[in-house]
Image (spheres, rainbow, N blue to C red):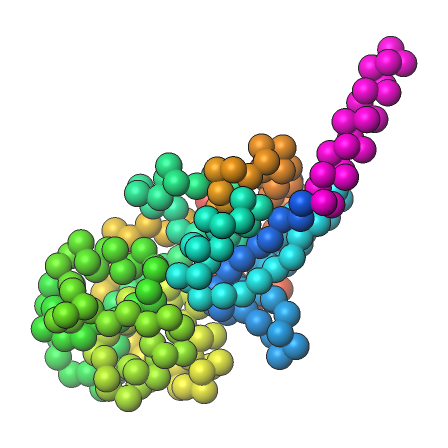
Amino acid sequence: MRLRMMLTVFVVVFYSAVCHANPVTFIAEDLPPYHFKNPQGEAQGALVDIAKAVLKGTALTATFEIMPMARMFQQQQANPNAIMLSLLKTPNRNSQFKWLGKVYFADAYLVSLRSHNDEVIHLNFAKEYKVATIRGYYAQAYLEAQGFTESENLVLVSYYQQLWRMLYKNRIDFVVTNTLTLENELKRTGLDPSLITKRIHLDELPSSLHFAASKQLNPQTAKIITDRLNAIKESGEYQQILNKWQLPIPTRL
């Protein structure tokens, strides 16, 4: 019995030391209010707060970094301890990552300026115009699968600020975007959200956002994060964080 207790203590102490020696790095793009850099250059947002709540009471230590979407994938491949704060779970990504739990959702629309007069009731009609999204987003693969190409009607940019400035200057006609972050993005870019209108709900696009890690992430670390995420959902702390950021509670957690 005493030997078993000593072995248990050893395992706990050893794993605690490993956790501190190999901190995880939560990485995300600048996407308010989910995750963004505050004026002090620190990561902030609803999903940052959720990740911090997950870490509470564990031996895990973590850093947070905000970067462009394309660089996120490079970082995640280079660092086995990197965890994406919110990656859209799609069929083609399913086998590429270790999925640690659903953290939120997206709601994709084709949007335009209200002043755009032409009626567009189907995505195919938008092929006559310039349609834009963020490089590396699943929306890029989706639009390409629908027949959009960079040489003709697809515009890809690295930051949402570029996206919206181009739309407001009439350099592009439509944007495929998550409308749950739309108003925050426009306000942070200094643009009037009332000038935007939703055109088509793209409900065939996947909408489930997850903590996503490299398959090389330590299995024990992965289990701790998954278990803690489930725990804060059950305790109500998860819902409190979303309320703080004025985000709707998902119908299915």
The magenta region covers 1-21
- For the stretch drawn in magenta, the main secondary structure is helix
Q: Nearer the viewer, residue 45 or 144?
A: 144
Give the answer, above or below, for where 26 lies relative to 109.
above
Q: Based on the displayed image, in which of its 4 quarters is residue 193 positioned?
A: bottom left
In the image, residue 63 lies at what x, y percent?
65, 57
Relative horizontal placement of residue 162, taking residue 122 as reference (left or right): right
Q: Nearer the viewer, residue 120 or 229?
A: 229
In the image, residue 100 lies at what x, y percent?
52, 41
* Residue at figure coordinates x 48%, y 37% from the top left: 215
Relative horizontal placement of residue 102, taking residue 199 as reference (left or right): right
* Residue at figure coordinates x 29%, y 59% from the top left: 139
Q: Based on the displayed image, in which of its 4 quarters is residue 12 positioned?
A: top right
Relative horizontal placement of residue 217, taking residue 179 as reference (left or right): right
Give the answer, above or below, for where 139 lies relative to 91.
below
In the image, residue 161 lies at what x, y percent?
41, 78
Give the answer, above or below, for where 243 lies relative to 77.
below
* Residue at figure coordinates x 71%, y 41% from the top left: 19
